[in-house]
Each structure stands twice: as C-alpha cells, then as structure tokens.
Amino acid sequence: MKKVLFSFFFLLVCFCFFVPTVSAHELYLDVEEFSDSEELRVDVKWGHIRDYVSEASHEDYELFVRYPNGEEEQLELEAAGVNARAYVPIIEEGDYIFWAERVLGTYTPEDEDTTQLSSHMAKIVHHVGNGSSQVDSPIGLELELVPTIDVADFSTGSLEGYVVLDNEEVAEVHVTAYGPEHEVLEQTTDQDGRFSFDIESSGEWLVKANLILEEDGEIDGEEYDVTSHTSTLLLDTKEEQQTSANIGSLFIMLVIGLLSGSAATLFVVAKRSK
C-alpha cells in the first residue's frame, strides 16, 4: 500500500512540474459582454488555455478593435492580475473584432541551438445582438487565421477557415485546435491556405497557426536564426439549439402536472362524498 501511495505521489509531483512546460506559450484574447453597463471587457492572456496563464506586463501588448461601423481604434490597456485588460462601449449591434500583438523577442527552445524571433498575434470576433456573423476577410495581421463560418451561430460541425501571411494565403502552415474537453486537433493548410476541423463539442476552441521562416537578423542586440510567427483565434462556440426539445419537455411536464392535479382533486372529492 505504501508503495502504491508513494508511486501516486511521485507521479503527481512529476505531473505538476511537467504540465506547465509541455505546451508553448500563446497569446489569446477573451471577451465578456456586460449588457447592464453596455460594454465589453477584453482580456489579453499569455499562456495556454485551460492549463495556465503566465504573468506579463500590459506594456508588452498592443490591442485594437474594429467596430461594427468599420472604425478602428487602439485601446488603452491596464493591468488586471496576470492579464492585460481594456473596456469597449457597445455602440451598436454587429461584429466587434479585436486583435493584439505582443512585443517581439528572441527565444531558444531547450535542447536546440537555433534562436528564433518570436512574433505572437491574437484575434477574436465577438458578435453583439442577433443576426449572422461572416467575418471572412483579413484585418491585416502579419499571420492571421480567418474563419469562413458564421461565428455567431456555430456550435459543432465543420470549422473551416484559411491562413494568410501578409494578406496572402499560405500553404503548409501548422494549425492546431484546442477544444473544451482537452481535444487537440492538428493539420497543415493546403495549397490555398485552407484548413478544416471536425468539431464535436461545444465551448471555447482556441485555434493556433504557427509558421517558421528562414529569416535571420538581430533585435535589441540579440541575434536570431529563424522567425517564428504564431497567431491564435478564439471561438466561443454555442451549445446546439434545443428550443423544440425544451418546449416539448415543458409541454409534457405541464400535462403530467395537470393530470396529477386532476387525479388528486378527484380523489379528495370522492373521499368527501363517502
């Protein structure tokens, strides 16, 4: 018994030390809507969704928004715990597209002699109100994931999109989709830059594209051998609509309630008449 407990404890300790390092850091955005105050809260996060978030200075990021009317604005960020945060007023219904970029830096992976310039970008589309949302055009990120689905009404099914580098479709980009039930789906873009994932669970899906280019140089006195571009897109998919099923269930419950009430009433009346 002691050996079993010791083995379990050892594995638990190894797991705690190992998990934070198995996944590379990613930049991603999270949006929450507050209908009472008519504003959106945007959090810029650095880490790995559902695993960990690392602390970083809000001065390391730039955050932008495109409003439904097409106007664009750079947002002022503030520190919020380990995240950077900004607030945006809801001016009208439609698509609010947010994107962020992290300050460039060099990074040398463990057990490798190649130093890379790390370029991290993130995007999210938040739809306010009713109606469809088809945001299938790039906003101008150096490396960008562009969905070709209705992001306002997507739950499960085929998640489709394409990847652009400097607004041009790019092939053989490694794309990974992290699902709400810890799914990890991977593929590379085709010759037209297209990708497609079969999504079977609803919730937050983080889609990440990574492209390493043979571009060397120097930044802040540090030389690098290659350039690594990483871009993310967070899709908060909705649960499948169950309106008809819910109405049917409510109707059945109502009928059962009425029958039970009628039966109880008849029982009381019959008992009193005796």
Image (cartoon, helix red, strand yellow):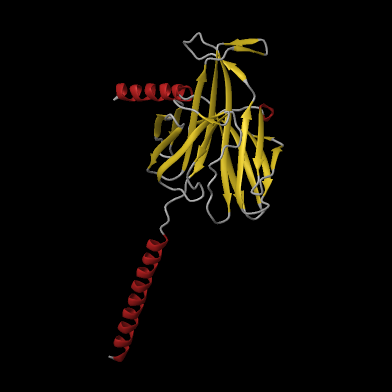
Give the x, y percent position of residue 187.
40, 30
Nearer the observer, 93 or 42: 93
How many marks do you count on the picture?
0
Q: Quadrant of residue 181?
A: top left
Q: Is residue 230 left or right of residue 2?
A: right
Quadrant (top left, top right, bottom left, bottom right) of the N terminus: top left
Nearer the observer, 52 or 110: 110
Q: Can the viewer see residue 49 in this picture?
A: no
Give the x, y percent position of residue 248.
37, 66
Write the residue at 42% across / 61% down.
Answer: 243
Write the residue at 45% across / 32% down.
Answer: 192
In this view, which residue lies farthest toward the top? 113
Write the residue at 57% across / 46% down.
Answer: 126
Q: Can the viewer see residue 157 in this picture?
A: yes
Q: Is residue 180 left or right of residue 256?
A: right
Nearer the observer, 183 or 53: 183
Q: Quadrant of residue 242?
A: bottom left
Give the x, y percent position of residue 274.
27, 91
Q: Quadrant of residue 202?
A: top left
In this view, which residue lies farthest toward the bottom? 273
- Tell me: residue 273, above or below residue 173: below
Q: Is residue 64 left or right of residue 156?
A: right
Give the x, y percent position of residue 103.
64, 24
Write the residue at 38% across / 21% down.
Answer: 10
- Tell me: residue 253, above or below residue 13: below
